[in-house]
Amino acid sequence: MVAILSRRSPYDGSSAAWVTSVAYVATGDKHQLPRVHSFGTSPSKVVFRKAGCDIKGNINERGEHIYHIPGQENYLATGVNPARGERWFCSQWEAWWAGWRKAKV
């Protein structure tokens, strides 16, 4: 199902400024998408590394949520500390969907 939402933009003083968003909403439970990550929750419940879940979700000093995949420059030096909200992901898609961005190097 597709939901289309329109609302006035709070950033434009013009009364004609509208923002339109399109969202895909899963119906039923056959192909459920992971929920957006928030502190203390995890769509796949991967706090400790499971086999095949080798993407590291790290939070840097500025609070940015960044994921690292094997083979990237800083992958081996990057740690995962669940107490800080860091976690493991099983796919890049899951990391992206949870609001994390891919490391630049």
Image: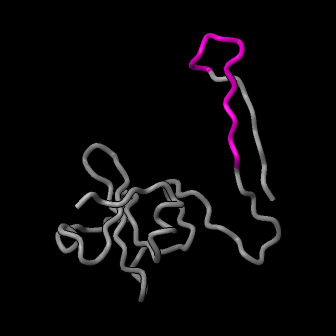
Looking at the image, what colour scheme do you see? one colour
Expressed as whole percent of the image width and height from the top left, the position of residue 58 reads: 32, 60
When asked about the image quadrant of residue 54, the answer is bottom left
Q: In this view, does 19 lie to the left or right of 103?
A: right
When asked about the image quadrant of residue 55, the answer is bottom left
Observer-nearest residue: 30 or 15?
A: 15
- In the image, residue 18 sits, relative to residue 88, either above or below, namely above
For the point 70% across and 51% down, the residue is 23
Task: Examine the residues drawn in magenta and state their main secondary structure.
Answer: loop
Query: Residue furthest toward the bottom?
Result: 51
For the point 71% across and 16% down, the residue is 16
When asked about the image quadrant of residue 10, the answer is top right
Image: magenta residue range: 10-22
Residue 8 in the magenta stretch? The answer is: no
Expressed as whole percent of the image width and height from the top left, the position of residue 81 reads: 31, 65
For the point 22% across and 67% down, the residue is 78
Viewport quadrant of the N terminus: bottom right
Viewport quadrant of the C terminus: bottom left
Q: In this view, does 57 lie to the left or right of 61?
A: right
